[in-house]
Image (spheres, grey):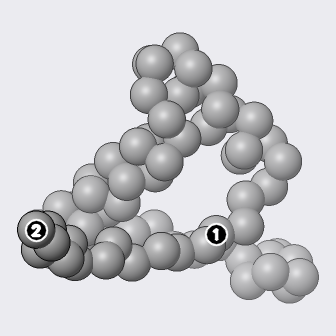
Amino acid sequence: MNEPARPKKPRTTATLTAEQGRLLRLMAERQKVSVSWLIRHAVDRLVEEEGKGLQLPLDMPARGIKKD
């Protein structure tokens, strides 16, 4: 018999700096989880905070633009 089709999970691609990638791999190894799990966990926390009305500190300069 055919199994019911599972809904597809959306895929997202993000470009990290070499340092971000290195640190994520170290964290994943230390916590014995995958990098993907860490990213999903971080997204869950971000979505939860947004739901509480908390605002992100998005005062980072735009890429390629130096902040005074």
**Type of amino acid at the residue the image marks with label 2:** Met
Nearer to us in this view, 9 or 35: 9
Q: Nearer the viewer, residue 13 or 24?
A: 13
Quadrant occupied by the N terminus: bottom left
Q: Position of residue 20 (x, y in %)?
A: 71, 46
Q: Is residue 58 left or right of residue 43?
A: right
Residue sitting at 19 percent across and 76 percent down? 5
Which quadrant holds residue 38? top left
Q: Which residue is mark 2?
A: 1
Q: Nearer the viewer, residue 4 or 43?
A: 4
**Residue 48 in the figure: left or right of residue 29:** left
Q: Quadrant of residue 13?
A: bottom right
Q: Is residue 5 visible?
A: yes
Which residue: 89% across, 82% down?
64
Q: CA distance from mark 2 to mark 1?
A: 38 Å
Which disc, if any, is residue 31? none
The spot of residue 66 in percent (x, y) is 87, 78
The residue wearing badge 1 is: 14
Q: Secondary structure at mark 2?
A: loop
